[in-house]
Structure formats: structure tokens, C-alpha cells
Image (cartoon, coloured by chain):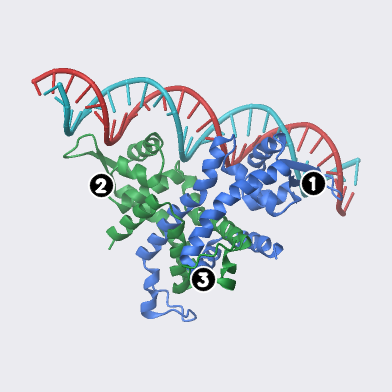
Chain colours: A green, B blue, C cyan, D red
Amino acid sequence: MSDGRSANPYSGENLLFLTDEQLRQGIEAMFFAYRGFTADPDRILADMAYGRAHHRAVHFINRAPGTTVNNLLNILGVTKQSLNRVLRTLIADGLVESRVGQTDKRERHLYLTEAGHALEQTLSDAQRARMRAAFRDAGPNAVAGFRTVLEAMMDSELRHAYTRLKDAAS
Amino acid sequence: MSDGRSANPYSGENLLFLTDEQLRQGIEAMFFAYRGFTADPDRILADMAYGRAHHRAVHFINRAPGTTVNNLLNILGVTKQSLNRVLRTLIADGLVESRVGQTDKRERHLYLTEAGHALEQTLSDAQRARMRAAFRDAGPNAVAGFRTVLEAMMDSELRHAYTRLKDAAS
DNA sequence: AGCTTACGTCAGTGTTGTTGACATTCCAAG
DNA sequence: CTTGGAATGTCAACAACACTGACGTAAGCT
């Protein structure tokens, strides 16, 4: 356990927060919390013919309107075939619009329709409500720590994708 | 947004951490971080005939040796048919042992075999390594906040399951 | 004896991931 | 200018893993 890094500001007894038992509790907290995190949208989606994959697609198309399929692929981390099945149903149902690229006609730019925005609102309202309650209960200091740890846990490519989205919103 | 709870210690401009944009960033952080969280075990499991479901089962059997099938069902939040498929392969491959209950012979108590422990070690070593790096980078204060928010995000039943596991380890 | 509980299993279905094959479009080398 | 390769996106088939529903067995409880 003690790796003896002298550059680390937390030394000696303060390293107790890095014991295997602490890490295991962090792992389990992550597991149980993620279940809660997806529970509300999942309940809403269960009534429709959609699943979690549709939610993710709708979320990120709303977040970055006009994004290409390839771009969305990198963010979601699935194969293009997998994403395509989801997009096909969303387009067929009139929730997403796919426009051929102006400069590069190979690209498809994705936009939410009115109905798509409505679904996105419904889903993210539910998810934000839980997040808001958790944030409020925990307080701003805990929220800052929450985000610091999560960012440190991401793969570096995903952290960049996350940062780009974050910065684009400002 | 402003719910005007006077019992809340964070008021006025401090509520900025509860804006929709902040919540959205929390949601995205959760999404990307969870991908990182499962990436390492997934890579290991991909080479075997196992998946994430096997990992979860092995993790919690290791965590609570002798647990019953029903108990595991509640923790994992899947149907018995779903869990059974996983358990059957784990037992057939000699990673998990199922013992008929002493007092109640209807129950099956689950234990990891030597080989089961070996797999659990491999998987949780990989997962803990990432968690440890994230915790160390973020520092103990952030880690405390991380766990506070995650606990607040759980469903209450799951929070109880989580707390029981946590307390049982002390 | 009859009801409930715990567990296992078979059959069928849906979502979501995968690989393989293919069409279209762009671009650059010859 | 043509041709070959790279990039983008679509269609088809398959695997993993969740779900529901129905049924069977053994054991405990009233």
C-alpha cells in the first residue's frame, strides 16, 4: 500500500483513505450510485420502445446539435453499427433529423426535432431531479470533490471529450 | 430552481452549484467516469468467456461469503433467471461453490473456490488500481465529497445494502 | 394437509453490443 | 482525369444479458 512517494502531499497516517477497504467501498458506492443514476430515465423509457442507448444518443445530440455520426460514436464509445440501429429508430419516429453535410456529403449532421427535444427534456428532468437532490444534500464542497474524483477516474480521451463539452457550454 | 428551503444551509449565490448546467456536467461526469470504472475489468473479462455480470457476482460473493442466492439477487437487482445463468457457468467452471443451508435446506450458500478468489483478485486489482490513482490525485477531502454525493444518489434500499456491506467489513 | 418460500429451469422476447459486407463520397497519386 | 484508398454511414446476422411467464422440486410453516 505505502508507495512512499515523497511528491505526494498526503503522507503518513493520512494515506488511510487509500486502503484496499476504502477503495472497495468507493467501488461499491460507484456501483450502487450508478444504478440510482439511471433508474429514473430507465423507468420512463421502459414504457416506450426505447432504452438507455436512445437516452444517451438524444442527450448528446441535444448537447452538441449538428454533431456528426462519427463524432457521436467517439463520445458514446460504441460501434457505428450499434449507434446506427438506435439512430434509425429515432429518425423513423421523428425525434432526430439527419442532414447531409454541406461541405462533406459523406457526413450526416444530427439535430433533435421538436418531439426529440420534448423527450430529452422529460428524461433529463428526471435525471437532474435526482442529481439536484443529491447535490443539495451533499453541499457544494462535496460536489466539488465528487467531480474531481470522477474526472480523475476517466480515461484520458474521455476526459478530453468531457472537457470539450463542458467548455462549449460556457 | 429556487425551492426556498430555509432549513438548507446553502442559500443565495451559493446555490449556483445547483444550476441546470452544473447538474448536466455532473450527469456527464458520471457517465464518462463509469465507463472508465468498468473499462479495466471488462478488458480482462473479454478474453475469457465471462462478462460484467460474472464480475459483479464474484465481487459480492467474495464480499459476503456464504450469502444466499436471494440475498445476492437483492444486491445485484436482477432477476433470478438472469443471475442463475451466470451462477451456473461459474459453478460449472469451479469458481463458485454452492452449499445447501444447514438450518434451512432450501437455501444455497455461495462461496468462492480457490480459482474464484484468484479471478476476483485479478479483477479487483485492476479496478482498485484505477480507483487508487483517482483517489490519490484528488486527495482525501475530494474523496469524502465523492462518497457523500454518491450515497445521496442511491435509492434508499440500495443505500441500506451499501451501508450493511460497509459496516460488515469493520 | 395445505400454503408459502427458496431455488432451479425451460421457453420466448427485447435491448444493445459485436463483426462482416457493402454503398457512397472525398481526396490524392499517378 | 481516372483510379485506388480512406472516410463515412447503412444493412444483416449474431452474441451477451437483461426481462417475463410458467412450471417443478424441496423444505419450512401454520
Question: In the image shown, does A133 or B46 lie closer to the viewer?
Answer: B46
Secondary structure beneath disc 3?
loop
Q: In the image, what residue type sits under mark 3?
A: Tyr
Closer to viewer: mark 3 or mark 1: 3
Q: Does residue A164 sit above or below B84 in this rendering?
A: below
Q: CA distance from mark 2 to mark 3?
A: 45 Å
Q: What chain does mark 2 sit on? A: A
User: Residue D30 appears at what percent x and percent y?
Assistant: 87, 54
Residue underneath mark 2: A66
Point out the tag, 2 or 3, that comes first from the N-terminus.
3
Quadrant of residue B22 within the rendered picture: bottom left
- Mark number displayed over residue A10: 3
Does the CB distance between marks 3 and 1 fall below 8 Å? no
- Residue that badge 1 annotates: B107
Question: In this rendering, would A94 be left or right of B144?
Answer: left
Q: Position of residue B170 (x, y in %)?
A: 70, 66
Q: Residue at x 51, y 48 (%)?
A: B38
Q: Quadrant of the N terminus of chain A?
A: bottom right
What is the secondary structure assignment of the residue under circle 2?
loop
Q: Nearer the viewer, residue C11 or A102?
A: A102
Q: Amino acid at mark 1?
A: Glu
